[in-house]
Amino acid sequence: MVADRQASRQLMRVLLVEDDAGDALLVEELLAEVDAPIQLTRALSLTEAKPLLGGQDCVLLDLGLPDASGLQAVRELKGADDKIALVVLTGLADASQGVAAVAAGAQDYLVKGQVDGDLLVRVLRYAVERVRSEEVHRQLRDERLLAMEKGRLERGLLPTPVLNDDGLHVQTRYAAGRERMLLGGDFYDVVEADDGTVHAIVGDVCGHGPDEAALGVCLRVAWRAMVIAGRPVPEVLDTMQRVLVHERHLDGLFATASMLSVAPDRRTARLHLAGHPPPVLWADNKSTLLSAPVGVPLGVLPGANWAPATIDLGDDWSVLMYTDGLIEGRVDDSAERLGADRLVQMVSAAAAAGSGWQRTVLDDLVRDVCVLNDGDLVDDVATLLITRVG
């Protein structure tokens, strides 16, 4: 009750748009009778009212103005500020216009001569609260739509691996950068082909925003379709480039990618790099940065080729694939970037903790990199860890 009384005494700013001096005086007297905490500003016409809308909580609008009348006045005011509360004043003979005004966007209407001070204040305050409630509902609706869109992007960018081999374990993590709550253009995928080869990709569309995220989805889906169809890796990458060039919304937009193809014997792999940082291999109790010819990013050079490198994995191994957001964070307060070499050291330190380190290493790496960066990373981070088990 105390809160209700305090709310009822809060100052409300009302713009009265009324050209009749007698009617304007009547409104002032009605408000004075109930000692309403209302700051009243008067405009004689719609033209005079429009510049005064800023900072007002509510407009009390006469439907018979010299420069606009009836629903025309309502539409013009709502067009000037569609979020301001609006109550219309009608004469006894044209009360039906009040109903039409509400249908056109006003929050309520009052009939001149049938209003007392309490009713006037109550209608004004309810109109303001109704607009605020509608704005809250609109924001909630937008948040729900945003969550639905994020869910669609997540399903497109962050899929479930198509993997039947129990001897391989795949872990993935995605961390959004601090400048956005939505996903960016980072993506990953893992697919086991019919011949037993396990293909993995991590990619990054340059730029940020829903367009880049949508393009990332297109690239990942194209990659998965081509891999499942059993197409050669050069054809897969070339198709991704063709899709990118066709679907991108800006000329010059490109994407980097790292693709690893683990042989059916799980002891070797072939690595393709399209302008992307190389993966980190943990094997024989040490971490190393994998090496392969670094081709141009997808979408940069028509007819580009991406030469592979053959990687010896050994018997027990883990491969960390990631987007550059993981290594582009600052180190302490300096301008120095983390870099891939220091990431290798961090993986070695994590592995030194003993068996089972792979279960938490992705979360640990992102946390430690954020600590070194003295805050959340600016760019999104997609990470993928493939481990041979058993």
Image (cartoon, grey):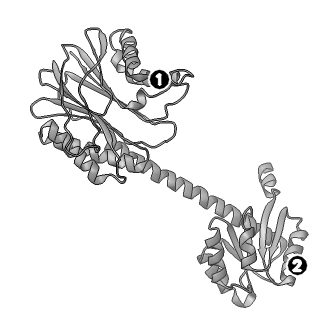
Q: Is residue 111 left or right of residue 294?
A: right
Task: Identify the residue shown where x is 76% and y is 76%.
Answer: 48
Residue 40 sits in quarter: bottom right
Q: Which residue is mark 1?
A: 369
Task: Identify whether 278 is placed above or below 100.
Answer: above
Residue 25 is labelled as 2
Quarter the C terminus occupies: top left
The spot of residue 76 in percent (x, y) is: 64, 77
**Tag 2's secondary structure?**
helix
Q: Is residue 56 left or right of residue 195?
A: right
* Front-most of residues 36 and 192: 192
Indicate which disc, 1 or 2, sits on the residue closer to the N terminus: 2
Q: Residues within 10 Å of mark 2 (few under 14, many from 20)?
A: few
Task: Identify whether 307 is placed above or below 91.
Answer: above
Q: Residues within 10 Å of mark 1 (few under 14, many from 20)?
A: many
Does residue 178 appear in the picture of this structure?
yes
* Front-most of residues 1 and 239: 239
Task: Identify the residue shown where x is 64% and y is 64%.
Answer: 83
Residue 135 sits in quarter: bottom right
Q: Is residue 126 left or right of residue 29?
A: left
Task: Identify whether 140 is placed above or below 26.
Answer: above
Q: How many marks?
A: 2
> In the rendered structure, which amino acid carries the disc numbered 1?
Val
Residue 213 is labelled as none
The spot of residue 141 in percent (x, y) is: 51, 56
The spot of residue 145 in percent (x, y) is: 46, 53
Does residue 360 appear in the picture of this structure?
no
The spot of residue 36 in percent (x, y) is: 85, 64
Residue 231 sits in quarter: top left
